[in-house]
Amino acid sequence: MNRRNVGLALAALVVVIIIAAIFSGDETEPQQQQQSLRQQAAAQPTVSQPQASKQQQREPPEQQARTDEQPQPEPDPYEELLSQLTIAPESDAGIDYDRDLYMPDGWLLTDRPRCNVRELVLIAEADSISEVNQDCRPLDGLWLSWYDGETFDDPSDLDIDHMVPLAEAHDSGAAGWTARRRSAFANDLHLPASLTAVSRSSNRTKRADDPAEWKPPLRSAWCRYARDWIAVKIKWSLSADRAEVDALRVMLNTCPADYERPPEYPDRTPTVVQIEEQQQQADQAEQSSDTAETPEGVYASCDEAETAGLERQRGSKGNSRGFPSELVPSARDGDGDGVVCEE
C-alpha cells in the first residue's frame, strides 16, 4: 500500500471515530437531563390539602367530629325585643300624672260575674285555691310573692302590682293616650306579664321606679322581671330611657338557658260558696268594733288630717300626694298603695 492510500485510510478512520463520538454524546445527554429533572422534582414540595390545625392533629377523629357537631346556643328572643324598644328620655308631654286618668273607678269588673280584675289575678296566680264567695273574693288559697319569696294565705296581704307602673307608663308615652286606652292598660288581663300578685311591702318599695332604680330583692326573680317588663313595653309601644335599657340587659344576663315562665291559670274556676247574710253582718260588726275607737294620732277624715297640718306624702303609684292610710283608716285606699286622699 502506498502512502497515499494509507493517508486516506487514516482520514476515514478519524471521521468514523468523530461520528461515533457525536452519536454517543447525543444519547447520554437526555439521560443526564432526565436524571436531573427527577432529582429536581423530588426536591419540590408536594402539593396537598391544607394542613389541619395542631389541635385537630392532636384530637382523635371521634373527638373532632363531636366538636364540629356541638349545637350553638339559641339567641335570647328578649334581647331582640329589648333592641326594638324606642330609647327616649321620660316625658309627661305636659300632662301631670294622676292615677284617676287610668283607674277612675278602681279595678274594672270582668266578664266573669261579680269578679273584678284584682280578684281574677289572685285566682289565676294562686299556687292553690278552691273557694271564693259570691262576690268572687277568695276564701282560701296560697300565694307566693315572687319578688321577695314570701308566702301568704290571706289575699288581703297582697297587692296587685302593675309590672310597668302607671306613672312610669305615663312618662313613657301613655300621657297622650285616650282614656279608653289608659284604662285598658291599667286592667290588662290579656298579657299575664302586665299584672302580678306580690307582697304589699315589695310593691310599695318599688313604687313607680323602673329597673334602673329598683329590682326585686330576689336575684333569681330578675330574669322573669326583665322579660315581663320588656313584654309589657313592647305590647303597648312604650319607650325606655338608656339607664333602664342597660339595667334590663344586666337582668337578662341572669336568665338560665332552660328558663320557663311559671304558669298561670286564668281559666281556673273555684267553687262559689254562698256566705249567709247574717255571717256577713257579723263580720261587718266585728270590723266596726275594731275601728270604733280612734287611737291617738289617727284622724277621722282626710279633712281633719288636712286641718291638723299633716304633711302629705307621695303614693307608690305615681306623683300624687296624700295621707298614710294607717293615719286615716276611714278613707278608701282605692289603688292599694298605702296612701289615701291623693291629690
Image: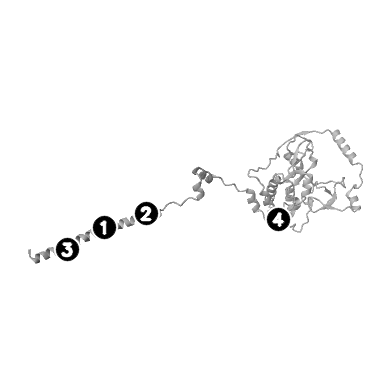
Q: Which residue is mark 2?
A: 42
State the image quarter where residue 295 is shown.
top right
Q: Which residue is mark 4?
A: 243
Q: Residue at x 33, y 57 (%)?
A: 36
Residue 28 disc label: 1
In space, the residues marked 1 and 3 are separated at their CA atoms by 22 Å
Q: Which amino acid type corresponds to the residue marked 2 in the rendered image?
A: Ala
Identify which residue, 145 or 267, lies in the foreground. Answer: 145
Q: Is residue 241 visible?
A: no
Q: Which residue is mark 3?
A: 14
213 lies left or right of 283: left
Q: Position of residue 260 (x, y in %)?
A: 66, 42
In space, the residues marked 3 and 4 are separated at their CA atoms by 108 Å
| Pointer 3 or 4: first along the chain | 3
| Pointer 1 or 2: first along the chain | 1
Q: Position of residue 221 (x, y in %)?
A: 71, 45
Q: Residue at x 86, y 36 (%)?
A: 283
Q: Is residue 305 visible?
A: yes
- Contact between labelled residues 2 and 1, with CB atoms less than 8 Å apart: no
| Pointer 1 or 3: first along the chain | 3
Q: Is residue 96 above or below residue 151?
A: below
In space, the residues marked 4 and 1 are separated at their CA atoms by 88 Å
